[in-house]
């Protein structure tokens, strides 16, 4: 596959940035750096909120983790489990909005888990994520979060097998996430923009900027002209059909802070 190279962030025009009202961003390895949230990233989130720019993480992380994020970080909501559920702050409470009926999604999650368990016995280097118990819609397999060195070959083999079986599976920088059909980062983002912020898909192309670091961000890179990859996405570029338009100099949360400074 021909490698497509994003332009450096410095090439992004000030005119394009002036229209940005929403920043949707991946979390792990995009806001974080080596598993931690750097102070510069938290400062960037606070500065964006103060400037009236709404930040919404879009993560493959579990709903339990996302509940904490939406309660303690300066964000306007969190899209969790790869698009399975949107967590919306309501004062000191959090409202959960599921991609489909919650009970139906929980039943489908149980089916996916039962399907996956025998496969994991053939990939001994892989395991269910420690946060699987706190997931409400999807099933996640750890290959690089608590597994060292990362089990990349096993991840690729299992992912190929799942895709070959017609399952909705995607790889992040640390996990494989298996969701029910139709669940996708962009599908939920489009719904959230329309239903909760009254922003159409056409307007979103001018007002939304997306930031990510991994192959499971492709649907977002494909839909938003203002898309940015933090520097650590470089290793994934040869395998991507849809790449970010721009790339930061710094990795992870440092790259996000770099982008925020330019945006502000």
Image (cartoon, rainbow, N blue to C red):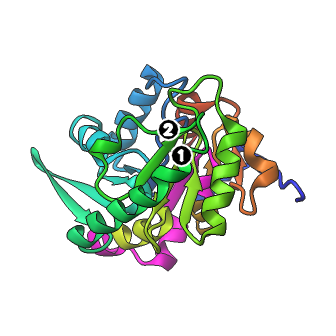
Q: Give the camera-side residue of 80 and 164.
A: 164
Tell which tag, 2 or 1, sits nearer the viewer: 1
* Residue picked out by circle 2: 127
Q: Is residue 181 left or right of residue 29?
A: left
Q: Residue at x 70, y 32 (%)?
A: 249
What is the x, y in percent for residue 40?
47, 24
Position above or below: 86 against 212: below
Q: Residue at x 46, y 41 (%)?
A: 27
Q: Residue at x 33, y 70 (%)?
A: 99
* Residue picked out by circle 1: 120
Q: Residue at x 58, y 32 (%)?
A: 144
What is the x, y in percent for residue 155?
65, 44
Q: CA distance from mark 2 to mark 1?
A: 7 Å
Mark 2 surroundings: few (<14), some (14-19) or many (≥20) residues within 10 A: some
Q: Which residues are magenta?
A: 194-218
Image quarter of the N terminus: bottom right
- Is 101 one of the magenta-colored residues? no
Q: Are marks 2 and 1 in contact (CB under 8 Å)?
A: yes
Q: Is residue 217 left or right of residue 5?
A: left
Mark 1 surroundings: few (<14), some (14-19) or many (≥20) residues within 10 A: some
Position above or below: 251 against 93: above
Q: Main secondary structure of the magenta part?
A: helix
Residue 19 appears in the picture as rendered: no
Badge 1 marks a residue whose secondary structure is helix
- Total label count? 2
What is the x, y in percent for residue 78?
33, 51
Residue 145 appears in the picture as rendered: yes
Q: Is residue 97 left or right of residue 154?
A: left
Position above or below: 31 against 5: above
Badge 2 marks a residue whose secondary structure is strand
What is the x, y in percent for residue 68?
25, 37
- Is 216 one of the magenta-colored residues? yes
């Amino acid at each position: 596959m021909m490698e497509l190279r994003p332009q450096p962030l410095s090439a992004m025009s000030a005119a394009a940035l002036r229209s940005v009202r929403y920043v949707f961003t991946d979390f792990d390895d995009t806001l974080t750096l080596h598993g931690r949230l750097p102070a510069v990233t938290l400062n960037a989130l606070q500065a964006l909120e103060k400037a009236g720019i709404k930040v919404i993480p879009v993560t493959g992380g579990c709903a339990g983790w996302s509940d904490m994020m939406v309660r303690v970080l300066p964000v306007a909501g969190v899209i969790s489990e790869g698009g399975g559920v949107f967590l919306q702050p309501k004062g000191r409470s959090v409202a959960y909005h599921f991609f489909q009926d919650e009970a139906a999604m929980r039943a489908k999650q149980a089916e996916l888990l039962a399907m996956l368990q025998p496969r994991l016995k053939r990939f001994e280097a892989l395991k269910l994520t420690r946060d699987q118990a706190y997931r409400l819609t999807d099933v996640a397999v750890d290959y690089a979060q608590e597994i060292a060195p990362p089990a990349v070959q096993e991840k690729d083999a299992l992912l190929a097998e799942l895709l070959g079986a017609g399952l909705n599976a995607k790889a992040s920088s640390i996990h494989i996430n298996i969701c029910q059909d139709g669940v996708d980062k962009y599908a939920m983002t489009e719904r959230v923009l329309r239903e909760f912020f009254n922003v159409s898909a056409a307007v979103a192309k001018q007002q939304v900027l997306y930031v990510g670091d991994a192959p499971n961000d492709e649907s977002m890179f494909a839909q938003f002209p203002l898309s940015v990859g933090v520097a650590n996405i470089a290793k994934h570029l040869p395998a991507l059909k849809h790449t970010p338009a721009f790339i930061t100099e710094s990795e992870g949360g440092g790259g996000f802070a770099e982008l925020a400074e330019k945006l502000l």
